[in-house]
Amino acid sequence: MAQNGETLEDEINRLLQTNRYDPAILPRLEEFIEYQASNDFCDSDANLATLKLYQFYPAKYNPPIVAKILIKALMSFPASDFLACLYLIPERRQVDEPIPVITQLADLLDRGEFKQFWDASGACRDLLEGIPGSITAVRDFMTDVVSRTYHTITTSVLGEILDLSAEDVKAHVTSRGWVVQDDVITIPLNEDNQPRPPTMDEQLSFKQVASNML
Amino acid sequence: MAMDGSWRRGGTPQMTFTDADIDAAEEMATSGSYSEVPDIVGQFLKYMHQTFLDRNIVELHNLYEQVFQRFTDRYYRLMSWPSPEHVAEYVENDAVFLLLYNELYYRHLFSKMIPSLAQRVDSWQNYCNLFEGFLQHGMIDHDLPPSWLWDMIDEFIYQFESWCQYRAKLKSKTPEEIQYLRENDQIWNVQTVLSLLTCLVHKSNIISWLLRGEPSGSNDPDSANFDISTLPVYRYIGYFSIIGLLRVNTLLGDYRLALMVLQPLDFDVSTALFTHVTACHVSIYYYMGFCYIMLRRYEDAVRVFSSTVIHIGRIKHNHTRSYQYEQINKRNDQMMALLALCLAMQPQQVDESTMSLMRDRSGERLSRLRQGELQAFEDLFNYACPKFISPAPPDYDAAEDTNMEAPRLQTKLYMQVVRSQLLLPEVRSYLKLYTTIEIGKLGALMDVDSSTFRSHLHALKHRSWTLSGSFAVPPLDGVFSTSSDVGFYIERDVVHISDTKQSSRYGEYFIENIKKLDDLHSQLKRKMTIENSKGNPKGGRRTTRVS
């Protein structure tokens, strides 16, 4: 199906433009998901299109591919991709392993229970390790939340949150320009980890007023 | 019936079909002779067909929205309109017009009675032929009022929705019906439904029209450079099909794609095409806002809903007698419910006019939600959500009713999101009591250890870090920012809370009062005109000028 000189990504884009609802494109989409899984990049549009075709043609439902799509979605936190995927998977399929485990992991991320995430991730360690970049992506998400929550944090607390040894924590944060001193890490100031101004001024654009007056 | 002899564009003299006209016609009709099509209805159909041939859109709009409704109330409250084979003779067997009439016939039938399997199939076949006609340039020499085109797309999707429900209820079906369904899965097939809408979008060239803000070619069908989007009938059907795709994708639970199809649209209410038909305006914002909720973009949902409920509040009185009135009212109530859900899920600043509507209409609702009553969330969601569908045929061997599967899944996932953040309002309210406090002490207030409380704080930061956009950018676009009403950060084991107050909102106050003044002014003006036309107003004697 690929045309001259076209990469798989271009081809998928073209197919989604012209034949999004045609089950004949499923093999190419599945191949593309395998490709995403081993190449550390993610195309949510293509992944949702795949789940949609499974929704239309239940006989074509492919559990290993679905598991990979879900791990990919887990890696896109804080975006809502994971939830977007679940909406398209029939309820009776959602009880098949490994979906419940992956769903539990997503729920733990949503609840900010990062330590528990690492404990629970053991149940699908193989799946996570089979997809390069998955652990790093989740850890990056947690690090972002930490950077908006803390101004200073001890290495031991952060180590627990990120499931890293004291050594690794130091390496992880210094690469981001965070400062480590006597087991206390200082995170550079951003909008969310410092006092807010006591009053918020009214912001009123012309457009807002105009749309209100029409 | 009056023929006032005013000659119209196409040469057809104008006819009126008021209640008095119909009464008069009934008196003249000879009693006893039964006919499938009463005389006056036949004349109406003839006239409607002529008006259609004349491309007299203003008159056709009137016939479609007012007169058709009047005849329905009069003759077809409990039975269907005359079947197409009886109508053909009145409309010169015009194939295109008959497709349009058929669509009205089935639409009316679906609204008044329970359609049979055969009728559902016939209506599907009619839609296929009708849309195929559009795609084969069959409408190039014709025109239809925008509201008719909108209703056509709207009904097409409604009947698809209805078919999916019907097909999934196997318990009450006869073996013959099940056998028929099993052998005919091309009927109301989801892939075909989506393809028809997509083809109408492509055929109409509407995307290019939207992106450029103008046609890209000539309006002469014979020119090599002909751009079909110059013809209103194609421009509208393409545009409404985009909104149709938004709706079907929402019903399927594909909220991201639903919003993605809207990317080329213009959301400036002073120019956007969706404002041309009120029902469409309400529909696009309802589905859009709903998709935002499901993707957890509550700020965007609030933006969309509040602009719509305010708009509806302003225009509702224009529609009290319209056939769309009930539908608009119901959607309005649903949007108020969804708005309450959003405000409970993510406390945020909303403008004063929306908030006062909220207090009037659902104050009690909102407080139940804010207390974290799960049942209140679920009830409101079920009331306000669209009717989700399972696109795949059911398992015909199981003979079960599976029509509730799709709504159950969407509700369940929504409730999971609600549950996973149920503790956050409590966390937020404890934070608000302090300016500096140790994590351990805060945890003790909620009976949890400090590690658990840390998690709650992470969750609070994570949940308030949300994607939000504006009407100026495509619907899926947006940037992440913090939307929380309470600011805090942690230094080792101590939480610092900043109490942020919104400074007074002068803008809103002024807007509110300018509007009041405006209303007052127009009321006064109306009163003055009435009194002037009465001649000397009572008690308003002109004062004699003192020189």
Image (cartoon, coloured by chain):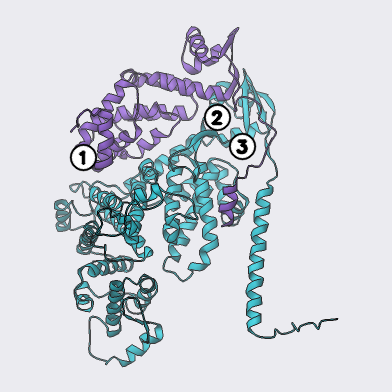
How far across and how far down the image is residue B233, in percent? 32, 61
Q: Quadrant of residue B85?
A: bottom left
- What residue is pinned by disc 2? B461
Type of amino acid under label 1: Pro
The reply to whether discs 3 and 2 touch (Cβ–Cβ < 8 Å) is no
Residue shown at the point (20%, 69%) measured from the top left: B95
Residue A45 in view here: yes
Whether residue B2 is situated above or below residue B176 in the rendered picture: below
In this view of the protein, which residue sits in the foreground, B251 or B97?
Answer: B97
| Chain letter behind tag 2 | B
Question: Chain letter for cyan?
Answer: B
Whether residue B178 is situated above or below residue B294 in the rendered picture: below
- What residue is pinned by disc 1? A23
In this view of the protein, which residue sits in the foreground, B463 or B319?
Answer: B319
| Chain letter behind tag 1 | A
The reply to whether discs 3 and 1 touch (Cβ–Cβ < 8 Å) is no
- What residue is pinned by disc 3? B485
How far across and how far down the image is residue A117, in percent? 44, 22
Whether residue A87 is situated above or below residue A196 in the rendered picture: below
Residues at marks 1 and 2 on the same chain: no
Helix, strand or loop status at disc 2: helix
Type of amino acid under label 3: Asp
**Image quadrant occupied by the C terminus of chain B:** bottom right
Distance Cα–Cα, label 3 vs label 1? 47 Å
